[in-house]
Amino acid sequence: QVQLVESGGGWVQPGGSLRLSCAASGFPFSSSGMRWYRQPPGKEREWVATIFTGGDVNSADGRFTASRDNGKRVVTLQMNSLKPEDTAVYYCNAMLIDAWGQGTQVTVSS
């Protein structure tokens, strides 16, 4: 069955970095663009980044970038210079089938 499993979240101090991963199974991963979204506490879910099948990346913020490994069926989100307002649950989304992971919590605070 389709599964998207995010990992790598946690607590980090402002200015730090985190690398999130999303492991995919159950669909043709290499044929699917992948998106990262986040939902800050009390707010709507918002788009963070998209990586297309060819590897091109669009990002809402230059501090964040996505990458993918089709052989391992993993998409990652590298987040640098983190700010407290980046605190959110981060989700990956498979565009081909509109599937979502369960999310991973990122907390940025001192």
Image (spheres, helix red, strand yellow):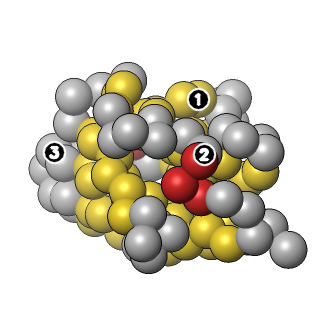
Residue 83 seen from this side: no
Q: Is residue 83 left or right of residue 41?
A: left
Q: Which mark is residue 46?
A: 1
The amino acid at mark 2 is Ser
Q: Position of residue 42 (x, y in %)?
A: 68, 36
Residue 62 seen from this side: yes
- Between residue 99 and residue 83, name the one nearer to us: 99
Q: Which mark is residue 32?
A: 2
Q: CA distance from mark 1 to mark 3?
A: 19 Å
In the image, residue 13 sits, relative to residue 84, either above or below, namely below
In the picture as drawn, the residue positioned furthest to the right comes out as: 1
Q: Residues within 10 Å of mark 2 (few under 14, many from 20)?
A: some
The reply to whether the C-beta atoms of the residues labelled 1 and 2 are less than 8 Å apart is no
Earlier along the polypeptide chain: callout 1 or callout 3? Answer: 1
Q: Is residue 37 left or right of residue 101?
A: left
The amino acid at mark 1 is Glu
- Between residue 75 and residue 32, name the one nearer to us: 32
Q: Secondary structure at mark 2?
A: loop
Quarter assignment of residue 55: top left
Residue at the (71%, 41%) spot, across then down: 96
In the image, residue 101 sits, relative to residue 23, either above or below, namely above
Q: Secondary structure at mark 3?
A: loop
Q: Position of residue 12 (x, y in %)?
A: 28, 64
Residue at the (67%, 66%) spot, across then down: 4
The amino acid at mark 3 is Ser
In the image, residue 82 sits, relative to residue 4, either above or below, namely above
Q: Position of residue 36 (x, y in %)?
A: 52, 43
Q: Secondary structure at mark 1?
A: strand
* Residue identified by numbered label 3: 81
